Amino acid sequence: MSKNNGPWRIHSTEESFSNPWIRIETSQVTHPNGDPGIYGVVRYANLAIGVLPVDEAGYTWLVGQHRFPFDAYSWELPEGGGPMDVMPLESAQRELKEETGLTAENWQEIGRWHLSNSVSDERAIGYLGWGLKEGESAPEPSEALEVRRVTVQELVELCLDGTVTDAFTVLMTLSALQQAKAGKLPEAVARHFQL
């Protein structure tokens, strides 16, 4: 049975692959111009959750790891998957603790984004965390992580000069910078974004 998806017409959809993290669907479609075709979509089992932690001195934490799809090392803010049946803030608190050992007393959501909306339904939620306390990290066994402490100013520069290429990290950083300029962040954090 065919159905419309905006200007697209979907005639059939079948699952091509699945694992605990993603499902790939392939659909037989009619393009908006009337031509027949196929469309592949990656469906995510989890939300993408990210945290921009900021301490009283204006430092944040980057997590370094090798990213398999690009065969390249990447520096990123703490981020990971949040199950759909868990409150996103709980997932953010878990990710921050797992990857850096940090806990935050204060939290503020700083944005929601679609990370690759031409081929996936991945949804991302970013948080700002402050009032930090250090502790022991507990990364997943499959992760080989390196943690680096940098100033907020350095993080902004790394995002703007292309050193940090992770889209989620760039989005969280520039969103926090803009919100600080607009007076939407607490002064305790916003003052570190006065570049």
Image: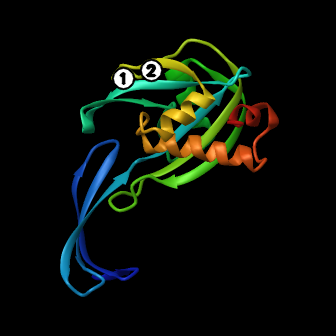
Seen as rendered, the residue at the extreme right is: 187
Does the image show residue 86? no
Viewer-side residue, 124 vs 193? 193
Q: Residue at x 68, y 26 (%)?
A: 104
The image quarter containing residue 68 is top left
Instruction: Estimate how packed mark 1 is, as few (under 14), some (14 to 19) or many (20 or more) residues with alpha carbons within 10 Å.
Output: few
Q: Position of residue 145 (x, y in %)?
A: 40, 20
Residue on which the image places disc 1: 143
Image quarter where the N terminus lies is: bottom left
Image quarter where the C terminus lies is: top right
Q: Residue at x 41, y 23 (%)?
A: 140
User: Are the residues at dot 2 and dot 1 in contact (C-beta closer than 8 Å)?
Assistant: yes
Does the image show residue 174? yes
Tell me the tag on residue 139.
2
Q: Position of residue 101 (x, y in %)?
A: 56, 17
Instruction: Estimate how packed mark 2 is, as few (under 14), some (14 to 19) or many (20 or more) residues with alpha carbons within 10 Å.
Output: some
Q: Residue at x 36, y 19 (%)?
A: 144
Amino acid type at image mark 2: Pro
Q: Would residue 182 appear left or right of 115 to someone viewing this image?
A: right
Whole-Å distance between the Cαs marked 2 and 1? 6 Å
Secondary structure at badge 1 equals loop
Secondary structure at badge 2 equals loop
Q: Would residue 194 appear left or right of 111 to someone viewing this image?
A: right
Amino acid type at image mark 1: Glu
The image quarter containing residue 24 is bottom left
Seen as rendered, the residue at the extreme top is: 136
